[in-house]
């Protein structure tokens, strides 16, 4: 399956889980801005994977540079979003941070899995050549 299809499936699964939590518990466990958090991470994960995949195609030897660069950019952008919300929001900062980092770890794990499975395919091609 392609990465875009996989990220769509993951995002729809998370939408279903978050929707069920909201339906059964209201907003006791889910922050009202969780939908924007989900959109943020789906976008950032897709952009990061696209950047890494394109970079590997051009220069496979610099994978670590591109991967760690994109990881640092993702962490800094995530920290900026959390600090911005905590600084300017007046309520439920802890709930926002918890929801944010749960979704962060889910999408980061998904990205790592996708990149590793893609690297296996690339290394198999290099060995056979």
Image (cartoon, helix red, strand yellow):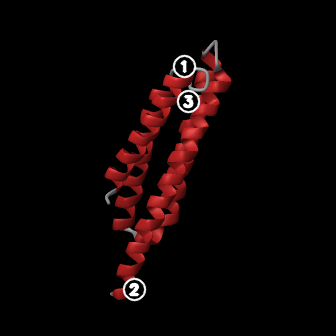
Residue lying farthest to the front in this orientation: 24
Question: In the image, is residue 19 above or below residue 14?
Answer: above
Question: In the image, is residue 1 above or below residue 119?
Answer: above
Which residue is located at x 59 percent, y 39 percent? 102
Residue 66 in the image, given as x and y percentages of width and height: 47, 59
What whole-number distance in Å separates the C-alpha atoms at marks 2 and 1? 53 Å
Residue 100 in the image, given as x and y percentages of width and height: 57, 34
Looking at the rendered image, the quarter that the N terminus falls into is: bottom left
Residue 26: mark: 1
Residue 112 in the image, given as x and y percentages of width and height: 51, 58
Q: Are marks 2 and 3 in contact (CB under 8 Å)?
A: no
Disc 1 secondary structure class: loop
* Mark sitting earlier along the chain (3/1): 1
Q: Name the residue that disc number 2 marks.
A: 127
Q: Are marks 2 and 1 in contact (CB under 8 Å)?
A: no
Disc 2 secondary structure class: helix
What whole-number distance in Å separates the C-alpha atoms at marks 3 and 1? 24 Å
What whole-number distance in Å separates the C-alpha atoms at marks 2 and 3? 42 Å
Q: Name the residue that disc number 3 marks.
A: 81
Residue 103: mark: none
Residue lying farthest to the bottom in this orientation: 128
Left or right: residue 50 compared with residue 109: left
Mark 3 residue crowding within 10 angstroms, few (<14) / some (14–19) / many (20+):
some
């Amino acid at each position: 399956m392609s990465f875009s299809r996989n990220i769509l499936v993951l995002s729809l699964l998370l939408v279903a889980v978050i929707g069920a939590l909201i339906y059964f518990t209201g907003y006791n466990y889910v922050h009202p801005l969780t939908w924007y958090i989900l959109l943020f991470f789906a976008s950032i994960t897709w952009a990061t994977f696209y950047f890494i995949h394109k970079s590997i195609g051009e220069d496979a030897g610099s994978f670590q540079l591109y991967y760690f660069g994109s990881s640092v950019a993702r962490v800094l952008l995530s920290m900026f979003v959390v600090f911005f919300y905590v600084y300017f929001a007046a309520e439920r900062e802890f709930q926002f941070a918890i929801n944010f980092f749960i979704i962060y770890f889910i999408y980061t794990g998904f990205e790592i899995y996708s990149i590793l499975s893609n690297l296996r395919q690339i290394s198999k091609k290099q060995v056979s050549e």
